[in-house]
Image: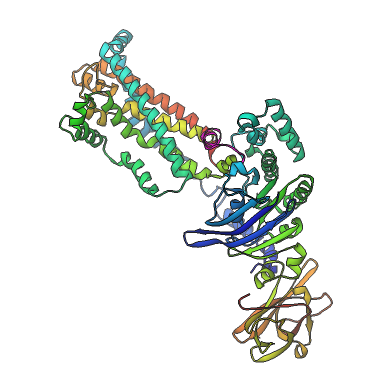
Amino acid sequence: MSTIHPTALVQPLASDGPPTLAKQARTQNGHRPARTEPAAVRIALTLIALAFLGLFIGLPLLLVFVEAFKRGFAAYVAALSDPDALAAIRLTLLVAAISVTANVIFGLVASWAIAKFEFAGKSLLITLIDLPFSVSPVVAGLIYVLLFGSQGLLAAPLQAWDIKIIFALPGIVLATIFVTFPFVARELIPLMQDQGTAEEEAAISLGASGFSTFFRVTLPNVKWALLYGVLLCNARAMGEFGAVSVVSGHVRGLTNTMPLHIEILYNEYQFGASFAVASLLALLALVTLIAKTILESRLAEEEPR
Amino acid sequence: MSIDVVNITKTYKGFTALDAVNLHIPTGELVALLGPSGSGKTTLLRIIAGLEWPDSGEVRFDGADALNRSVGERNVGFVFQHYALFRHMSVFENVAFGLRVRKGADKLPEAAIRAKVSELLALVQIDWLADRYPAQLSGGQRQRVALARALAISPRILLLDEPFGALDAKVRKELRRWLRQLHEELPVTSVLVTHDQEEALELADRVVVMGKGRIEQIGTPGEVYETPATAFVHDFIGESLSLPADVRGGRLFLGERAIALDSQGASEGPARLLARPHEVDLADPAQAPFFGKVLAVRTFGPIRRADIQIVVPSGHVVVEAAVPFGEGLEIGSQVGLVPRRYRVFGAQA
């Protein structure tokens, strides 16, 4: 019952006990704080970790640039200004721009719906968003070939309308969108769920429309997380190999993205040119990494307190 | 603006949050919805605001149907339990929000918005915090911002959901008085949800005691404390000493022993006798209607209480009685209890 029991008022006094126990534990442990290892162990562990990182990540990255510039800066520029290389760079940028835009729109809509509303089929939608993470990109590419290819399910209507999807830009974009599908939504859903709906309710109670609530309250509250998702999505879109390889057809100067172009050059023993283009992707990775670090600190601001 | 709640029922997946609730709140009154968690008080508040819709029933503002208006069209100021301040906006922009989202003819020029916000910030005494962000404020300051923001749309109805729930005791008391003053100064009807009886009794003109989706009693703070309508209200508000009894032939029994107390017209069958601890006198066990063994005596501040174990047909109950300071009460001794004022409720009340 709700009557205030006197013991409730006495209890705070009784809880004076535990601190003395904690003090005892500390003295029994010696002078060193309980959670610190000896200096030698700490240094050894750090060195092992650094050596591992250097061997498997730092060294390969360095080698990419070394190989790229092996035959001089002029050869590097020549490899990049080759018409096929330029076409691959252009195509990669175009595909990334389209698929990132599509996934930003989709990711915002899906995470908004999932985090702020209750509806039937919600858990199914969440599972579907995660699907691309569990499906091999090659399989994803094959799905589109089976759907839109010349022997595919939708081959007849596509031919009738003269629409080319496989071995053309639409197929590459579709495959990339599929593979990068979860990045934005996955970043936004947990944050939006944590933030709850109270601020949106406050906004509409103050007379804001649904539209202006979204743009004045919901979106600004997740802007750093959104940017973070865009960053990851973009990195993956530009670097995607498997799915794009299946649907692209490898037509030089037409349907080759940067990763595909790198592979072709490599297979033709043009290592210098291959690594020159690869250095651009490596550079993208570095820029992404730096931007990610900056964004992560901003992201902490959005976490609900 | 007066508020009428007529026959409101609301269920969530088989759980009845509100069960045919009726309530009239006259213009200018400050009413507290008081009840334990799960009593439906917040649901009722949110239905009045338009944040939730009832399954059936009506809500009327000044006699006009409110349910066909959305929350934005009802022009109610809502203060949320955890403030729900816009975290990416300064205090100033938080308060200005309701003015900035206006459209068409209602749109105010920037200068008018600035003047109005400054006036509101002065009213809630935080004008010096205008450029801060919510994360930089203390709980009490956030509460004031939330209130100023709700008042910016010049509401005729102010709804507050556990407004002081997250504040420490001292700030809570201060803000409570200040809110009461503010209510006097503004032309608003205020409804406040709280589970804190002290808050409700101190602040409200009238208290609506709710339990399990129903209104148990509506009355002034004095009425709900002095003359509780049901055993639930007696238990919930203030301290209670509760004893099981039976009503047979209009007389009160404890087991087989008749008690020399009035049954107050309670229905036949099992009943409960409820009294305030400070209205129960200690007496000689041989002459008192109740008696029992003293288990413990405690003193805190000006209050002294004893746990007394009373044998009843179903075993025993431990009640808490007030002990006068002069009285020496020995642990383990027998003592009698004589309620000066008490209420008897039938089992179903």
Left or right: where A264 falls relative to A210: left
User: Looking at the image, which residue sits at the far top?
Assistant: A74
Check the picture and name the quadrant holding the C terminus of chain A: top right
Q: Residue at x 59, y 44 (%)?
A: B71
Quick check: is A169 in the magenta stretch?
no
Judged by its main secondary structure, the magenta piece is helix
Check the picture and name the quadrant holding the N terminus of chain A: bottom right
Quick check: is A206 in the magenta stretch?
yes
> Above or below — where is B132 with respect to A29?
above
Q: Is residue B264 visible?
A: yes
Left or right: where B139 falls relative to A250: right
> Above or below — where is B203 with respect to B111?
below
> Above or below — where is A147 with respect to B13?
above
- Residue A107 position, x and y percent, is 41, 36
Depth check, front residue: B38 or B77: B77
- Residue B217 position, x and y percent, is 68, 66
Q: Residue at x 68, y 91 (%)?
A: B257
- Residue B227 position, x and y percent, is 74, 71
What stretch of residues is rendered in magenta? A205-219
- Residue B52 position, x and y percent, is 55, 50
Depth check, front residue: B28 or B112: B28
Q: Quadrant of residue B93?
A: top right
